[in-house]
């Protein structure tokens, strides 16, 4: 079967990256977590002090873009890619609540999106890739052979993200995690630049009550059907 692009979009914390990673490993494809790229810009801006409690300096964030270099590197222990910001492994830092609280605003900046989308398209040039995000099937790879739109019940999503953060040793409240999800979904679906919308040709996957194995099986069946129709 020739290699394809698999685009997975959807709401915050509905398990896109978990299923995307499993799928990429199963198919021997590369995996790109596009959200982590926006998180890196946000982390860098926080460190440089151009995002502070009540100030968000958009022009200063744009000025930082040329000094930001992003890279993904496969980690054999976790069997997944780690995200590197200017050669520093920031996989852990970019998942902090302070980053989650600011990332939607950063990702709404046009100049930020232009840079990230160019990198994502470059990574997908030779296909054989699973990419998750918000605008992958609608904007980054509108011709992707398989597009999924993932969703899940808000309480289920909040609990999953809360458990994940706790397991990583972060001190968070379930209510704060839930509020952040709702807030990010609102910002991501209402922004001007490439908002989160379901692509017309995307297949919806509501995983509120599905195990990881069931989700993987569902997608692999779709790929089988696709292979039959594209060959
Ligand atoms: O997938 P995530 O929760 O790590 O993404 C973090 C934020 O990045 C999300 O709230 C919106 C933004 N994002 C985006 O605008 N476009 C993408 N393709 C991926 C993420």
Image (cartoon, rainbow, N blue to C red):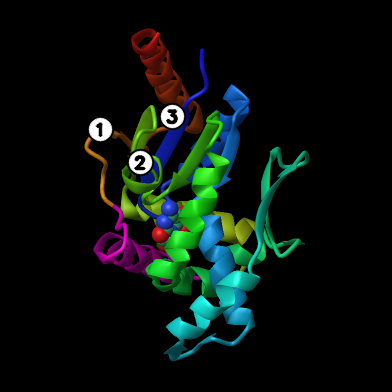
Under tag 1, what secondary structure? loop
Q: Main secondary structure of the magenta part?
A: helix
For residue 137, which numbered disc appears in the image? 2
Q: Is mark 2 within 8 Å of ligand 1?
A: no
From the viewer's perspective, is the residue at label 3 or at label 1 nearer? 1
Under tag 3, what secondary structure? helix
* Classed neighbour count for the residue bearing mark 3: other residues with Cα under 10 Å, few (<14), some (14–19), many (≥20): some
Under tag 2, what secondary structure? helix
Splitting the image into 4 quarters, where does residue 42 fall?
A: bottom right
Residue annotated with mark 1: 201
Magenta segment boundaries in residue numbering: 171-196
Mark 1 → mark 2, Cα distance in angstroms: 9 Å
With respect to residue 161, does 78 lie above or below? above
With respect to residue 192, does 29 lie above or below? above
Residue annotated with mark 3: 215
Q: Position of residue 18 (x, y in %)?
A: 53, 41
From the viewer's perspective, is the residue at label 3 or at label 2 nearer? 2
* Classed neighbour count for the residue bearing mark 2: other residues with Cα under 10 Å, few (<14), some (14–19), many (≥20): many
- Left or right? Give the position of 170 relative to 51: right
């Amino acid at each position: 079967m020739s290699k394809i692009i698999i685009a997975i979009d959807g709401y915050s914390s509905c398990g896109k990256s978990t299923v995307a990673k499993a799928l990429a490993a199963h198919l021997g494809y590369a995996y790109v977590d596009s959200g982590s790229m926006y998180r890196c810009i946000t982390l860098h801006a926080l460190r440089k002090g151009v995002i502070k409690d009540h100030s968000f300096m958009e022009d200063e964030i744009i000025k930082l873009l040329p000094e930001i270099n992003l890279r993904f590197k496969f980690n054999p222990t976790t069997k997944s890619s780690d995200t590197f910001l200017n050669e520093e492994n920031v996989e852990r830092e970019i998942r902090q609540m302070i980053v989650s609280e600011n990332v939607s605003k950063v990702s709404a900046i046009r100049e930020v999106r232009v840079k990230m989308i160019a990198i994502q398209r470059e990574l997908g040039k030779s296909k054989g890739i699973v990419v998750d995000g918000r605008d992958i099937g609608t904007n980054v790879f509108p011709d992707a052979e398989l597009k999924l739109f993932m969703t899940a019940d808000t309480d289920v999503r909040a609990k999953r993200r809360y458990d994940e953060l706790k397991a990583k040793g972060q001190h968070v409240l379930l209510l704060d995690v839930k509020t952040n999800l709702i807030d990010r979904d609102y910002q991501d679906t209402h922004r001007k630049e490439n908002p989160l919308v379901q692509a017309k040709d995307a297949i919806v996957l509501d995983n509120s009550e599905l195990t990881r194995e069931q989700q993987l099986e569902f997608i692999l069946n779709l790929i089988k059907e696709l292979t039959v129709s594209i060959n």
